[in-house]
Every structure is written in C-alpha cells, then in structure tokens.
Amino acid sequence: MFVITAPDGSVPMGPDEQTMIVAYLSILLIPAIVGIFLGLLRNERFGKVSVGLCMTSCIAGILCTPMYLYTEGFSAKFPLESFIGEYIIFIDLITSIFVSISSVVFLMVVLHMSHSGHGYSNGYLALTCALFLSCVLCMMADSVILLLVSWEVVSLVTFLMADNNDLPRWRFFMITHIGGLVIMAVFGYLWVFTGTGDMGNWHQLSALMDDNVSSLLILALFLGFGTKLGTIPFHAWMPEMYATSPTHTTALLTTVCSNVAVLILFKSVFSWIGISNLISVFAVILCILSVATALWGAMESMVQTGPKRILAYSSMENMALVTMCLSLAMLFFDSFPALTSLVTVAALFHTMNHSVFKSLMMLTVDSIEDVTGERTIDRLGGIACVLPGLSAVALIGAMSLTAIPPMNGFVSEWLMLQALIGTDTVSSSMRVFMPLLIAMMGVCGMVVATSYARLYGFIFLGRPRSKGASDPRPLRKGSLAPLMVLALLCITMGLLSFPIMDGLSSGISDITLIDTEYRIALSGNLEPLTLGILLGGCILLLFLMTRIFRTSRNIDETWGCGGTLDERMQYSSEGFSQPIVRVFHPIYGDTTEKRGNRYVTRFMEPFVKYIYRPIGAGIVTLSYQVRRLQTGNIQSYLGYILITLMVALLAVRWL
Amino acid sequence: MTPMEIIVELGQALLLIIISPLMYGIVSKFKALMQRRVGSSIFQPYRDLRKLFSRNEVTSRDCSWLFRGIPYVCMASMIILALVVPFFFTGVLAPFGDLITVVYIFTLYRFSMVLGGLEGGSTFGGMGSSREMMMSVLIEPALLLSIATIAVMSGAGTDMDSISEAIVKMGVAALSPALVLAAASFLITLLAENARIPFDNPTTHLELTMVHEAMILEYSGRGLAMMELSSMMRLTIFMAMMGSLFLPWGIAYDLEPASLLLSLAISLVKMLFMAFVLALAESILCKTRLFKTPNLLTVSFMLSLLAMISLYIL
C-alpha cells in the first residue's frame, strides 16, 4: 500500500513503525472515503453510517500530533500515480498540530450537525466527508499535484455545501477560483523551475531565484490565499455567503478552511520559497493591506444585524491580524530572528485559536436559530434566562474573541502586541510604523469588543424582542456537548498557551530557517495559568464571602421612570452602534433616510460598489458589443473566417 | 522573593484597595472646598458602602445569572490589578502579567460592565453601554500607546516591576518629550476611563449626561456596593499608575524601611496632588456634549501617538 519513509537525515524506520503508520493512515483516510460513497446512496441509514465514519476519521485526525511525537515525522507515498506526478504526504510538527486542532473542530461541528435536527441530506453528509478528506490531505500534501487537487476540492465542496443560495455562492466560486488559479500558476512555475513536483525537494528556493521573481511569487500567494481569508478587496463573497449558507458549512469554511489556507501559505512562504532580500517592499504592501482589512472587518462587523454576518466580518479581522503577522515576519526576517519567530508563532497560534472560538460562536448561532427561529439580533433577547448553559458557553466564546484574559484569544493578541512593543523592534528601520500598528490593534480590539458585546447582549440579555425569543424551544439533546468541549478548549488553550506555543516554535524551526527561541523577543512575562487561577479564585472568594453575610434578594420590575417598559423600549442594535458610526461617519459612508415613520440607516460596501459592480457592468457592456458580431448570417461568419485566416497567415509571415 | 518583599507588596496592594474610597472622598471634598461648600466628610464613601452592603438587593425579573455575577467579576479584576500595579514599592506581588495584561484586564472590566448594562431591558442600560463603547474605542489605543511609550522609553520592556526603577535611574534624561506627552495623554485617558467631567458626570443621574451611571442603574444593595467600590478602585489604580509609572520619582526600589516610609509619604502626596488636579479640572470644566468628547479623546490619542513617534525620531 503506502510507501513510508522517514524524513531526510533521520534513522530509517523499522517494520513495526511502518505497519503502524500504514494502519494510522488507513484509519484516517479510508472511513472518510467510504463515507463519501455511502452518502451517495439514498437510504437514510447510510447517512448515519456516513456521519459515524466521518467522526472516526476526525478522531484519527486528532491523533495526528501523538502520532508525530511517536514517529518523529514521516512521509508517505500513495499507491496512486498519475502522469503528472506522485501523491505524497509529509507530516511535520506544525502540520500535525494543525491537523489535530482542525480535526477537533471538525469533529465538534459534525457532532453538532448530527444533533441539530436540520435533516441534512445524505449528499450533504457525503460532502462533509469529502471536505474533511480534502482539508487533511491539503494540509499534509507534499507534492504539487496532491496540494492543488485537494485545494480545488476544498473550494468545490464548500461551494456545493452552500446549497440554499445562488448568487452569493457563485460569487464565492468566482473569487476563490481566481485565487485558486493564481495559486496554481505559482506552484506550476515552481514545478517548472525545480523540475520536480515533489515538494520534499523544495527548500528555500529563493536562494536559486531572482529576488524579483521570488518576491512576486510570494505576493501572488498572499493574494491567492487572501481570496479565501477575506483580504480586501476579495472579501466581497464573505458576508453574503456566510449569512445564507447552512451554518455548519459556514462553521467549517471559516475555521478549518482558514486553517488550511494559513498553513499552506506559511509553509510555502517560509519553507518552500523562502524569503529574499527584496521582500520588504512587498511585505510593507501586504502589511498595509492586512491592516486595512482588519479595520474594515472590525468596523463592518459592528453594524451588521445578522449574527452570521457579524461573525463573517470578524473572521476577516482575525485573519487579517494573522496575515499582518506573517508580513511582519517577512519584514523582520533578515535582521531580527527572535522577533520573526515571535510573530510567526503569534500568527499560527492565533489561527488555531480563531478556529476554536469561531466555531463555538457559529454553532451557538445555529442553536439560537434552531430554538427561536429568528435570524436577526434585533428580534432576539433574554435567552440567558431560559438557556443558561448555552449562554455560559457563548460567553466564553465571546470573551475569547474579544481577547479577554485568560482566554486563548488574549494570549495571541498579547504576543502580537509584544512583537510590536518589543525591544528588538526599536532598532528596526520600520519602527516609525509600529505606533500606528499598535494604535490599529487598539482600535480593532475595542471595535471587536463592541461588536461582540452587542452580539452577545442582544441575543442573550435584555427582554425577548419577539415571540420566538420569549418562548424558545428546548435545546436539542446532545447539541450543547460539542459547544462545551469547544468552550473548555478556549479556556485550556489560554491557560496552557505557553506549552502549545513552544511546540509551534519548535515545529517552525524544523521546517524553516526561523530557528531562534521566540521567548527571547518577549519583553514582559505572562503566566496565563496563574492569572486564570487568581482571577477565578478571587471571584470564588468574593462569592463565598457574600454567601456568609447573606442578605435577601427581591425580584421586581425593571425601573422604567414610573411607567411600564415594554420590549420595544429597549435600545435597538442599530442604536447601540450609532455613536461609533457617527464618530467614524467618513469611513462608514452611511446614509439615513426616513421611511414611513421610522429612520433606516444604510451602509454601503464600497468595494462592491466601486470595484465589483463597475467590472461586472463593463463585462456586460462588452458582451453586448460582442453580440453585435453574431448576426446569424452565414455569409458574415464566412467573412470572419476569411479575415481570421488572413490575419493569422500574415502574422506567421511577418513573425 | 523574600518574606519581607512579599509583605511589603501585599501591603501596598491592600493599601491601594483600602484607600480607594478615601481618594473618592478626598476628591469630593476638594471639589466642595473649591465651590466654597463644606462638603461631606472624606470618609463618607466608606459609610455609603457599608450602608449598601447591608441593604437587601432588588433585581429585575428580566435579569439572568450573568447580571448577578458581574459585580464579582468587576471586583475581582480590580483586586488583580491592585496586585500588579506598583504603588510605593517597585516590586509587585504577582508577576504573572505585564502592562499589556493590565490594559486587557481593564477591557474585561469594561466588557462585563457593558454586558451588565444590557441586562434588565431598560433603555438607560443600553444607552450607557453604547456610549461607553464609543468612548473606549478611542480610549483604548491611547492607553495602549502611552504605556507602550514608557515601556520602550525605559528600556525595561513591559514588566510591571522594572519600569519605574528604570525610569528613576535614568535621572533627568527621563524628562523627555515622550514621557511628558505620554503622561498628558494618560491624564486624559484617566479622566475618560473613570467617567469624570468633561466626559461624564458621576454625580448626576440625568440621562443626557449619563454613561457610567446608566450602566449600573439596575444594581442595588450589595451588587451596587461592589460596582461602586470597583469603580473607586479603578480610579485609585489609575492614579497609582500615573504616580508610579509616569512620575515615578520618589518610589522605593529597595527594602530599606527608611526609603519605604519616605516613598509611602511621597506616593500619598502624589495621590493627594492628583486628587487636587482632578477636583480642579472638574470645577473649572463642564461636561461636554457627548459627540464633542471624541474631539478630546482624539487629542489624547494624538498625544500618545506623538509620544511614541518622538521616542523613535528624537
């Protein structure tokens, strides 16, 4: 079956180890493949089996890191071959960590999916298996053909999984495929350049290349993967697609697919292509682009009313912070090894954290939609009284996203700020920009906090604003468990963040030239575990103290200036964000108009209005012009053929 | 860490917590004197708190478990901050966090208070929360930049227990434009964060001016006491940070009893001076319109940005 080899320079493997790896890969891949085929059958029972098989594969995926630790990395060649190359996978530490965390998230989403009562069709379940398979293979891929094929499958499958909308998913299809083409072109170029599609032979190719070329390749890769990560102006598909697809599709798309994109981007930039001297110009461009994306994502997420749109824009912001870190890493690469190490660890750790807390929030939103039947936060409220368990796990997710200590989101933002304030940064030539980046982090952080306080507050707190919210159905059995696991993961990844980051750091040094200890660049210390215990202990102590000296508590109406309040008298979500919108009016470009007896504020997407619409309109106009050629008259077609022939012949003659 | 050090550090944290109502009282007293009133006693806040603590609580029927938990979180976060902020001795008891953590713990405090405001379903709470977030979007970057400035300027990094010592040891050289600008920015941040005039008026309950008070309107009894006490602690912690990080001269960095006593006296004088400045500002300024406050906050933001940039250019 598989041909297993140890990574270069290590001891060859014994037969026992080889058998074990073959067994592991079989458990990882075969159930998902069988799941795809079972899902194609119409019988409902097969659908359940397919979900079970997908979960088996996910559990095997979680074991990827233990497997790496046991074998210290291996590469495996598939028993398949095509005329354009072999299918090879390679497991290093970073890959295994990413596979594990993505599998955990995937498993939880699938668990929630199977308990959600959406009644997904068997086809959808087959696609889920296919998505898992393609994501895992894409992360592990070590040959160009496998990488490109699985990347394409990821895009196609997510496109197919967004099955109840039309325009948004075609927009997604177009934009990600343009990105996919760019990526394909880059890898194709590298393939021709090296003469081999086996990426095990690609190490720091930029040393052999012209600086201009390698820098352009990296820029192209950033933009190509940026289409998936929502870098402006390629984010146009995100909000609509997220808002209209089934929530589980969105949850997988925003977490697992982003993990894949960031991992491949990281590996290709820092391991396969490598950093050239010219990169700093491009890195500055990418940094500016990322900062703009982060600000735009944060700001827009604050004014949306659909929970999934809020999450979509906040994904943009999070991924922009990651690409900002990666571009800073390119900037610092030459002269500040410790700092480079620090920002790459921050980027990868933030990606992992993002996949955990974002899937938690997405699944929460799905549960809320399920129990109340409402899709905008303006019609929700008061859920915390009825579903305290759900509100508690959602609070943990919201706090993680807002980077509140001691959750995991806080630690990665802390690392980023450390990199910006850090002692090494002071002597860099780019230091004048650092204050601007710090300010950006501050503004983004608070706007995101506003956005999540708003999301959480309007869903869970206050009075119910609609019938569905005042009398929600009970939660489906078993749908809270995956959320609890994810919430627990948010906390543990925060408390135990340093061991995880040490692992990431040593993984980075395995495959790239970044081999300095990242802790050298830290100028302050943080012990999330102590902080968490102290904070929890303090709260507990205060609570116990008030238990001892008890006073009674009465329940009464909310104070309403002597009158009675109804639920329409609460602040609306639009009103909540209004002060910030008013302060940042020039950026939002919002217009308020009176419609009947109420005022409506509209926000425009300038990228759609000024970039996509004109391009679309131009293409339509052009095709109308072209249509005039198509007269349907056979003589004119013969004339076209004649003219084409003449031009072609003349061209051949002259060239 | 020696036992002596631990005692001193625990002592300064406790002192910080204990004097916080007193500082509140002193500010009110100064204000009263400036307005030629007798004013209430400087110990009045303690009496108010004791009264509130012994009262029964009334909560709204639309409030969830979170509403009851928030006062504990607010108190706990301020207690944690009291442990990490140096007051009259540079060492701190709990070196688990640095300046950046301090900023994010303030975010924890603010986030929970804002959620508390959204509870209960009254109009006031939402209004206060919304305004608070508007201001904090501009406060947060200024706060981050001003502390980043002193972290970089002192060359000590972001560790709480080495910055003040580093700045004191720099001598006159520390009086650079960077420090002055950062301190000015921090002062504006202090006013804005603690809901003082000209950003907010803590003594009124008028809906046009309410920000902080609107958010805690639904609390009563013990919950209100904890919210009030934690907001007093926030003011004191900000003042202590101003005194020990931005104007650290006089702070003790060894454990000699004489220098500790001297430092304690100097720190208390600093606090009194700041209380005076606060009262003066509140007496001569008036509460600005809500949508004019961003102008002032942008000034603070610009000052801190200039501070950081001047550090790199000069």
Image: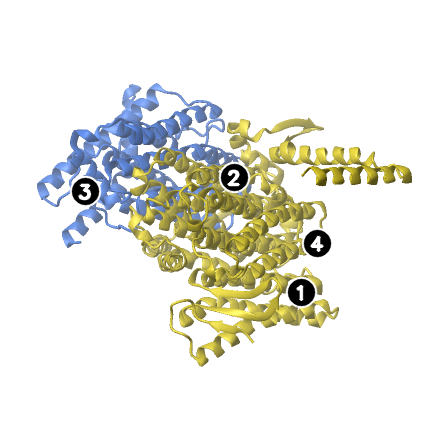
Which structural element holds mark 2? helix
Q: Which residue is mark 4?
A: A163
Q: Which residue is mark 3?
A: B89
Q: Which mark is residue B195?
A: none
Name the chain under label 1.
A
Instruction: Identify the mark nearer the N-term, 4 or 2.
Output: 4
The chain letter of the yellow chain reads A
Which structural element holds mark 1? helix
Q: Residue at x 72, y 28 (%)?
A: A596
Hey, what amino acid is under mark 4? Asp
- Disc nearest the viewer among 4 and 2: 2
Name which quarter of the figure residue A70 lies in.
bottom left
Q: Which residue is mark 1?
A: A126
> Is the residue marked by circle 1 packed among few (<14), some (14-19), or many (20+) residues within 10 Å?
many
Q: Position of residue B146 (x, y in %)?
A: 33, 34
Measure how far apart labels 1 and 3 are at the Cα level: 64 Å
In the orientation shown, which residue stands out farthest toward the front?
A: A653
Name the chain under label 4.
A
- Disc nearest the viewer among 3 and 2: 2
Name the chain under label 2.
A
Tell me if residue A501 comes above or below residue A26 in the rendering.
above
Q: Are marks 3 and 2 on the same chain?
A: no
Measure how far apart labels 3 and 2 are at the Cα level: 43 Å
Tell me if residue A271 comes above or below residue B197 in the rendering.
below
